[in-house]
């Protein structure tokens, strides 16, 4: 199931909906002065209600969904952002959890204690979140990366002296991150200063935006209200009401939801120890982040295998014996990988290539045409990997399929099938083998 946090990005509540006080027009510099070393405490509550639309027999069938989430964290600004927001923060979560109902299925996600330290960065390609303490699972990434992006709070403001009643256009970058889009198509989000009284300014943000998420088209309608501490020059409260309509994507079903988030933010004069100098001194190098920490981890529910994978692979289905992932390239479907548990062999042994190819030949809907590769592949850690690559037709569609069988020294075996259309084969080259070579078999030591 796709993340409900991204779909239900945020909410509007009566907490900030009190009528505006009757005051004479007044101007205020509606801008934050963000500096490296600034620290905040943030609490975010989310409620979501709507439906997921799953395709069955050529039709979209609605399934009811509800979700609640709560996040609490302290964050330290490592660097401001040239686009008007915050570019890099170090966070420590004291709470990050969600409860979801989809049809009759219920699930709970909670960030484990050893992954509560998180670095968040705004990049040219979007945002990057990772834990310095180890690789995140996809579900953990969604918990920390798909709540409201507090790094863009300063960028939602006018950034200049503003009179009551004045309006401003929310910058495209801020709109994209506020709506949690991978890419922005268009936005007409507009801010307005509602009133100023007793050192507090209230502002509104209203409008529509369109964008993409994991290749799916999305439309949102926003009605938000926030409060700004005029003396402290900080956004302290935000309520964001978002109606969210997202089409079916290559890695996610269609959804239609209403979401409400209440955000409270307090400036901290003293640096919290959770993000203090001793913690920052142990942060990993950029090279380690690129090589390892930006990858996600997956562990089979029965402990039979595990692997780390790049974020362009997305888990789209799983059963007791199968795991299905899809590879996206620029939001477009590039390949599908199916990981299947294989019968265990005696220690030190594995299925023969002939046995493996015999199973491939009997696959339903597969009509091979030309074999491109057939043989053993390099493998570390005492593993054995055999690969067969062939062109052909799968259920009448011209494709390239790569079939892998990998076995561990104790006889554990896993098969991986990667299928792609011929025109996308170059995009997948090497990524299929990389996925297989990352698989570790047997119980974790």
Image (spheres, rainbow, N blue to C red):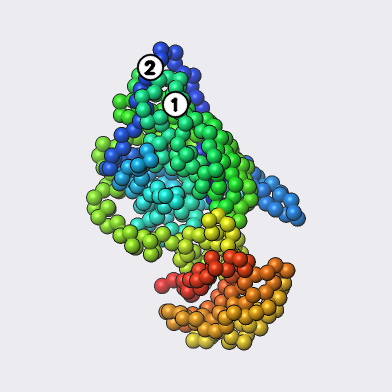
220 and 347: which is toward the camera: 220
* Residue occupying the far right of the picture: 57
Residue lying at 51% horizontally and 41% vertically, measured from the top left: 179
Distance from Cα at disc 2 to Cα at disc 1: 13 Å
Please give the name of the residue rendered at 41% of the width and 72% of the height, measured from the top-left corner. 445
* Image quarter of residue 151: top left
Q: Position of residue 393 (x, y in %)?
A: 69, 72
Which residue is denoted by mark 1 in the rendering? 203
Indicate the quadrant where residue 358 lies.
bottom right
Q: Is residue 320 visible?
A: no
Q: Which mark is residue 26?
A: 2
Answer whether labels 2 and 1 touch (C-beta < 8 Å).
Answer: no
**Rendered-image quadrant of the N terminus:** bottom right
| Labelled disc at residue 305 | none
Is residue 18 among what the camera can see?
yes
Residue depicted at x 41% and y 15%: 25
Whole-percent x, y for residue 2 in the image: 57, 52
């Amino acid at each position: 199931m796709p993340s409900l946090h991204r779909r239900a990005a945020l909410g509007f509540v009566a907490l900030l909906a009190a009528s505006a006080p009757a005051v004479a027009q007044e101007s205020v510099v509606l801008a934050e002065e963000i500096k490296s070393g600034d620290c905040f405490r943030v609490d975010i509550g989310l409620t979501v209600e709507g439906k997921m639309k799953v395709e069955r027999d050529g039709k979209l069938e609605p399934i009811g969904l509800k979700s609640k989430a709560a996040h609490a964290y302290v964050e330290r600004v490592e660097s401001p952002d040239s686009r008007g927001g915050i570019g890099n923060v170090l966070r420590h979560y004291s709470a990050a959890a969600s409860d979801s109902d989809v049809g009759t299925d219920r699930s709970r996600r909670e960030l484990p204690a050893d992954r509560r330290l998180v670095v968040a960065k705004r990049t040219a390609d979007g945002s990057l979140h990772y834990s310095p303490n180890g690789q995140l699972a996809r579900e953990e990434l969604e918990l920390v990366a798909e709540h409201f992006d507090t790094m863009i709070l300063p960028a939602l403001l006018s950034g200049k002296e503003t009179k009551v009643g004045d309006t401003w256009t929310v910058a495209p970058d801020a709109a994209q991150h506020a709506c949690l889009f991978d890419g922005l198509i268009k936005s007409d989000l507009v801010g307005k200063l509602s009133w100023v009284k007793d050192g507090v300014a209230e502002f509104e943000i209203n409008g529509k935006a369109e964008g993409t998420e994991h290749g799916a088209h999305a439309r949102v309608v926003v009605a938000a209200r926030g409060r700004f501490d005029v003396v402290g020059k900080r956004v302290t409260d935000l309520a964001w009401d978002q109606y969210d309509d997202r089409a079916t994507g290559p890695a996610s079903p269609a959804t239609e939801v209403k979401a409400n988030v209440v955000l409270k933010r307090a400036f901290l004069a003293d640096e919290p120890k959770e993000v203090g100098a001793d913690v920052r001194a142990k942060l990993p190098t950029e090279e380690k982040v690129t090589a390892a920490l930006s990858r996600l981890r997956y562990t089979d529910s029965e402990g039979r295998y595990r692997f780390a994978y790049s974020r362009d692979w997305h888990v789209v289905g799983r059963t007791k014996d199968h795991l299905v992932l899809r590879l996206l390239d620029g939001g477009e479907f590039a390949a599908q990988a199916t990981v299947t548990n294989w019968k265990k062999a005696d220690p030190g042994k594995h299925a023969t290539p002939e046995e493996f190819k015999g199973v491939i030949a009997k696959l339903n809907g597969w009509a091979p045409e030309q074999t491109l590769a057939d043989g053993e592949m390099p493998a570390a850690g005492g593993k054995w990997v055999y690969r067969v690559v062939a062109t052909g037709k799968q259920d009448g569609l011209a494709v390239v399929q790569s079939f892998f069988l990998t076995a561990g020294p104790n006889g554990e075996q896993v098969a991986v099938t990667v299928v792609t259309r011929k025109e996308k084969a170059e995009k997948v080259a090497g990524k299929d083998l990389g996925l297989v070579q990352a698989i570790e078999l047997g119980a974790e030591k």
